Image (cartoon, rainbow, N blue to C red):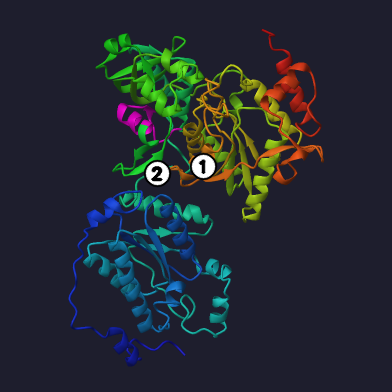
């Protein structure tokens, strides 16, 4: 029997349309502007309603909840109102006649308006088949001065039927369910929606990104490029532009930069430090130094994590010579590498910088030495890098940019990317940790976790193992099958090492997040080192061994990355292999320190069986045995 016309159920219409007469609207004491100043990490009033309409099985709920998670993780209040959930509570007394469908949408529209008025992004996922009902929901918001976005999830009927886990379409075609939208009840397609989304052939994340783009364009949320395929790079895209830049650079006055500063140019140019577009100006420097974040978004209301200053030093003579120029050239070993636009010179208070970044201004700290030896001023500005930086050391094939890594992860069909950084050789304890992380991710439901094995490739202190030796050693571990080659990406992270403990480890995580990683393994004392004054603290270390992991879990602006704590591994003498430490049988375990490992390598002694892959150990031992004895 077809659905009767509206009005056939007069008792329902009376119930739905009963109007209270002794009601006066009460005005709030709190304005929307005040709510916006105090609601969420992402300040500003963002209340609106996103209304997803489409057939059952189109993907509305999946997109709605994905969008909700995206916004909430970035400090933007959001709440998903789902059709099934509403009908089990607020609207459980309503059926599916046209009149009851109308009342269902009216109630939801009013509730969504209240959420939006409170500053929340209200995300509604309802079939809502009738155009008049959707227009009613829009008018409810328009009359309240609130934005309303109609999103048509335009998924073909046959595709929706293949997703019918509840068997509703089957029952509708068999006549068990009457008036089912798309089968015996017409769906009125939106004529002028704000956005049309087709989910067929797209992942939920890709479909959701279309809504994110719309909300960014509308100014509802600040722009953030972490979740798109392409980060902006500071290299020219065409060879002609490269030649134009090179010609311009030759005509400008120049500053000579150091090797470490060239490494920072590479970091900036490739997008590791996005949203930075060049060396920090003074306001950016102060934000980083005092808050470990940078303002971003069109209105500056969102804070990206950024914990370390990326700055360029200049001498007093440089400042006097160049202050006031519109652009200047950066040269490395006499060769132009980049142009700095609109340079801004400011005084470098070295002790303040060091004390805030490192927790010490001790001149014996390895990176502090560089700061004390640098110029009296810093100079910031936007960078135009002439061409991609190559080091011609036989390792450039490992230096993948964030965009290249993102593409690689996509080729591998990765649904989880977990990053692991080392500045030391890999032993089987490290491998065990990476293997166990993959196991945990598979148990959580991920189908294709991919490991980003990402050793630090910039400057390190003199007694660290050189990059070329570490890369050979890492490659030997992969070649031996200790780590799975099919779902491991070995690449070099070009940043210099600063040994800044919990401050620096935030930078390490943020850069990997820009490269697409969504999980980060953090160990004990990351980016740490012994205190230059061995008597300063009882344990002799500059930083507490646990603080890096703890700070990462609390750090602002790392919201799209989950921090995975490091499980301590040691050599299990009872089984002759590296295993996770068990305090209850601590006598079975031996901790092989870096000092002991170096001593074994230098003297030609072998580590216990099972400590390190044999070929990887041979590479390390050869390096230490060939070091000059002095």
> Which quarter of the figure is the C terminus placed in?
top right
Q: In this view, does 254 lie to the left or right of 400?
A: left
Q: In this view, does 481 lie to the left or right of 200?
A: right
Above or below, comparing residue 624 to residue 491 in the picture: above
* Residue under pointer 2: 224
Residue 545 in percent (x, y) is at 56, 35
Magenta stretch bounds: 273-289
| Residue 298 drawn in magenta | no
Tag of residue 132: none
Number of disc labels: 2
Q: Residues within 10 Å of mark 2 (few under 14, many from 20)?
A: some
Residue 36 in percent (x, y) is at 27, 53
Mark 2 secondary-structure assignment: loop
Which quadrant of the structure image shows residue 24?
Answer: bottom left
Residue 67 in percent (x, y) is at 43, 57
Which residue shows up at 74% across the image and 32% down it?
Answer: 479
Above or below, comparing residue 489 to residue 469 in the picture: below
Which residue shows up at 30% across the image and 41% down it?
Answer: 300
Which residue shows up at 33% across the image and 67% down it?
Answer: 112
Above or below, comparing residue 430 to residue 227 in the picture: above
Tag of residue 550: 1
Mark pair 2, 1: CA separation: 26 Å
Observer-nearest residue: 284 or 124? 284
Mark 1 secondary-structure assignment: helix
């Amino acid at each position: 029997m077809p659905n009767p016309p509206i009005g056939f159920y007069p008792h329902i219409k009376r119930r739905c349309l009963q109007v209270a007469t002794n009601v006066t609207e009460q005005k709030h004491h709190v304005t929307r502007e005040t709510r916006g100043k105090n609601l969420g990490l992402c300040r500003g009033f963002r209340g609106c309603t996103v209304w997803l309409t489409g057939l059952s099985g189109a993907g509305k709920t999946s997109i709605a909840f994905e969008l909700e998670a995206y916004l909430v993780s970035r400090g933007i209040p959001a709440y998903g109102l789902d059709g099934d959930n509403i009908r089990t509570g607020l609207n459980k007394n309503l059926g599916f006649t046209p009149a009851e469908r109308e009342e269902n949408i009216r109630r939801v529209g009013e509730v969504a308006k209240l959420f939006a008025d409170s500053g929340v992004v209200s995300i509604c996922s309802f079939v809502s088949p009738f155009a008049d009902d959707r227009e009613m929901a829009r008018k409810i918001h328009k009359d309240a001065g609130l934005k309303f976005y109609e999103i048509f999830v335009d998924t073909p009927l046959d595709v929706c039927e293949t997703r019918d886990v509840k068997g509703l379409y089957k029952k509708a075609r068999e006549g068990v369910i009457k008036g089912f939208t798309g089968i015996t009840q017409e769906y009125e397609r939106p004529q002028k929606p704000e956005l049309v989304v087709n989910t067929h052939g797209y992942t939920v994340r890709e479909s959701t990104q279309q809504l994110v783009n719309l909300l960014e364009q509308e100014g509802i949320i600040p722009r953030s490029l972490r979740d798109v395929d392409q980060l902006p790079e500071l290299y020219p895209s065409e060879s002609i532009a490269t030649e134009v830049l090179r010609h311009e650079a030759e005509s400008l006055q120049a500053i000579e930069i150091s090797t470490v500063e060239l490494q920072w140019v590479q970091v900036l140019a490739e997008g590791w430090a996005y949203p930075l577009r060049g060396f920090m100006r003074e306001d950016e420097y102060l934000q980083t130094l005092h808050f470990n974040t940078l303002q971003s978004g069109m209105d500056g209301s969102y804070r990206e994590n950024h914990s370390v200053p990326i700055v360029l030093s200049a001498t007093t003579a440089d400042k006097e010579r160049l202050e006031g120029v519109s652009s200047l050239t950066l040269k490395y070993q006499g060769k132009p590498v980049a142009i700095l636009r609109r340079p801004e010179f400011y005084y470098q208070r070295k002790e303040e910088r060091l004390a805030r970044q490192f927790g010490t201004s001790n001149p014996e700290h390895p990176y502090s030495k560089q700061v004390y030896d640098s110029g009296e001023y810093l100079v910031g500005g936007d960078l135009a890098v002439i061409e991609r930086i190559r080091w011609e050391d036989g390792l450039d094939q490992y230096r993948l940019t964030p965009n290249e890594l993102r593409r690689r992860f996509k080729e591998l069909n990765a649904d989880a990317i977990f990053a692991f950084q080392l500045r030391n050789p890999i032993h089987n304890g490290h491998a065990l940790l990476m293997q166990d992380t993959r196991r945990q991710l598979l148990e959580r439901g991920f189908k294709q976790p991919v490991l980003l094995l990402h050793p630090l490739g910039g400057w390190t202190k003199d007694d660290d193992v050189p990059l070329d030796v570490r890369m050979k050693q890492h490659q030997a571990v992969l070649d031996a099958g200790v780590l799975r080659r099919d779902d491991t990406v070995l690449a070099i992270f070009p940043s210099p090492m600063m040994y800044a403990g919990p401050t620096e480890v935030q930078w390490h995580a943020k850069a990997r997040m820009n490269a697409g990683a969504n999980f980060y393994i953090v160990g004990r004392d990351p980016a740490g080192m012994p205190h230059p004054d061995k008597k300063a603290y009882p344990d002799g270390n500059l930083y507490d061994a646990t603080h890096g992991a703890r700070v990462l879990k609390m750090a602002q602006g790392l919201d799209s990355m989950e921090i995975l704590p490091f499980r301590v591994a040691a050599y299990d003498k009872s089984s002759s292999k590296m295993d996770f430490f068990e305090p209850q049988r601590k006598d079975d375990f031996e901790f092989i320190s870096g000092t002991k490992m170096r001593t074994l390598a230098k003297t030609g002694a072998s580590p216990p069986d099972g400590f390190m892959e044999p070929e990887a150990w041979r590479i390390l031992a050869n390096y230490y045995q060939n070091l000059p004895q002095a």
